Image: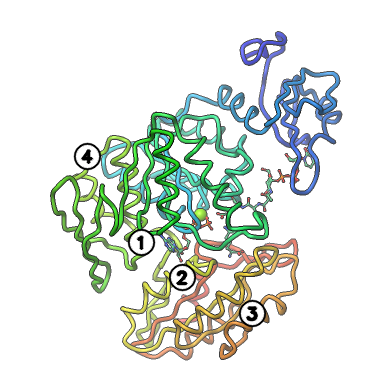
Amino acid sequence: MTLDDLVGGGSAVVTGFALDHRKVAPGTIFGAFAGARVNGEDFIPAAVANGAVAVVARPEAPVEGALHIADAEPRRRFAGLAARFFGPFPRVTVAVTGTNGKTSTAELTRQLWRLAGHAAASIGTLGVTTAHDQVSTGLTTPDVVTFLANMGGLAREGITHASFEASSHGLSQYRTEGLPVAAAAFTNLSRDHLDYHETMAAYFDAKLRLFTEVVDGDGAVVVWADDGDHSARVIEVARARGLRVLTVGAGGETLRLVTRTPTQLGQTLVIEAEGRTHKVELPLIGAYQAANALVAAGLVIATGGDTAATLAHLARLLPVRGRLERAVITSANVPVYVDYAHTPDGLVAALAALRPHATGRLIAVIGAGGDRDVGKRAEMGAIAQAQADLVIVTDDNPRSEDPAAIRAAILTGAPDATEIGDRRSAIAAAIAQAQAGDIVLIAGKGHEQGQIVGDRVLPFDDVQVARSCAA
Ligand SMILES: CC(=O)N[C@H]1[C@@H](OP(=O)(O)OP(=O)(O)OC[C@H]2O[C@@H](n3ccc(=O)[nH]c3=O)[C@H](O)[C@@H]2O)O[C@H](CO)[C@@H](O)[C@@H]1O[C@H](C)C(=O)N[C@@H](C)C(=O)N[C@H](CCC(=O)O)C(=O)O
Ligand SMILES: Nc1ncnc2c1ncn2[C@@H]1O[C@H](COP(=O)(O)OP(=O)(O)OP(=O)(O)O)[C@@H](O)[C@H]1O
Ligand SMILES: N[C@H](CCC[C@H](N)C(=O)O)C(=O)O
Ligand SMILES: [Mg+2]
């Protein structure tokens, strides 16, 4: 592929795309963007010295020695060009956004496609997942070059169906643009990431771009219908664009959740669809997992899946790593669950999911990440204190912050909680106190494999630690 093939402007061969000047090699097209930390335009001379043949940047950016592809929204332009280089992509791609449930929904969509016989993959917080493999990318929505290169690679491997998570950061930085998106889903909206977006309105607007701009003009939108005004707003913007809208949930029309009855290891769902009633034994616990499973089913149906077959496949779903994952049953016969609840709403959902299964006490181990939204800390403390019987406040990725200050902020909402900074000791203490009938919830880290302290990532896995404490 040459510059002429892509944009006109010369016979130079294009060998790749890069956002970081240190990754530029001869023949690369460099994207120079103003970032949160530094201005990428400052690295244009260095990128050209490294062999960049073209630079995608704002019209006013100074570019010498390479073709200047000028655009007022250079991130979007760069994504469009990179997509032509990295394609073709899986035949069907769908995206999921929302504060909570993106990873779960993307992963359950992949599973449902696989059960229908498709070669399927998902990209998100857990990494790039196929039936055979899981490779981490470090971010929920990777940078656009990594994202498109992975999507192209999946297509070459024979993947025909791919679901991906569109985080609000990813959407606001155009990290998932350029490829066709046949359907997009909305799970819910609640407090998170206000350190980055500052207001809830700006946070919601970032997410809405998935529906107003990213999903194809002839595509479909799947909406969890039970999140009040947020659901209504997504439906409104989707209809305004003439998109096909599928709603799911108790207030949904496409898949109407009629009843949900917890069983020992899962729940029985009664769902009305296309005028028929379907009874499904979902092997996952908690209202929130039923919600994510229904949104996933909506995405499969929106992209051509048979409704009855898709609903029948719900009974064969496997748990998602770190989402209400039962790590161990202790010698005192106490189940210990690990869950990635790291927002107030997520914590409400995780505690509510476990409550019906506890005949005794619900014991919660909670924390909150450093260098992230500070306002959620006290809220999470208050939720744990209200919904659990015993709360232990511990560390969860303090990053550059003083861990004691983060715990203190959580404790303002949970004055009765016990404070144990060291996460291993906190988990050990929870398990040591638990008696038959109790349930332990270890919240916040889910699948994560490390504790981020300063710049260091110390190996840490809640599931492994719980098992070693229960032995
Ligand atoms: C705040 C944020 O989202 N930052 C991400 C963003 O950085 P940025 O565009 O602001 O970049 P910057 O560091 O200011 O640099 C500006 C530009 O100069 C370039 N540069 C920079 C330095 C240099 O020497 N040379 C150079 O060329 C950079 O590549 C960049 O293009 O783009 C970078 C490249 O894609 C990301 O690595 C970086 O993620 C940081 C590490 C991060 O922690 N992000 C988290 C908050 C995040 O994105 N989380 C979301 C949400 C999670 C969820 O809710 O699920 C996620 O999707 O993971
Ligand atoms: N539909 C939902 N409603 C409320 N809470 C949920 C829902 N789905 C998941 N959660 C809570 O959020 C946690 C994270 O779930 P998941 O990883 O699927 O979300 P996510 O949107 O991908 O999160 P992240 O933004 O960190 O990538 C779960 O462990 C659970 O506590
Ligand atoms: N244990 C985690 C959860 C992070 C979730 C992530 N999506 C984010 O907020 O960036 C933390 O706060 O460090
Ligand atoms: Mg996720």
Ligand 2 neighbours mark 1 (CB distance < 8 Å): yes
SS of the residue under disc 2: strand
Label 3 packing within 10 angstroms: few (<14), some (14-19), many (20+): few
Q: Kindly identify the amino acid type of the residue bearing the numbered disc 2.
A: Val
Along the line of sight, the residue nearer the viewer: 201 or 112: 201
Q: What colour scheme has been applied to the protein in the rendered image?
A: rainbow
Distance (Cα) linking label 4 and label 2: 34 Å
Task: Provide the residue designation for mark 2.
Answer: 338
Q: Describe residue 79's horizontal placement relative to residue 186 as left or right.
A: right
Q: Are marks 1 and 4 in contact (CB under 8 Å)?
A: no
Q: Kindly identify the amino acid type of the residue bearing the numbered disc 1.
A: Gln
Q: In which image quadrant can residue 334 be found? A: bottom left
Work out which quarter of the rendered image holds the N terminus and state it. top right
Task: Provide the residue designation for mark 1.
Answer: 289
Q: Residue at x 65, y 15 (%)?
A: 7
Task: Provide the residue designation for mark 3.
Answer: 422
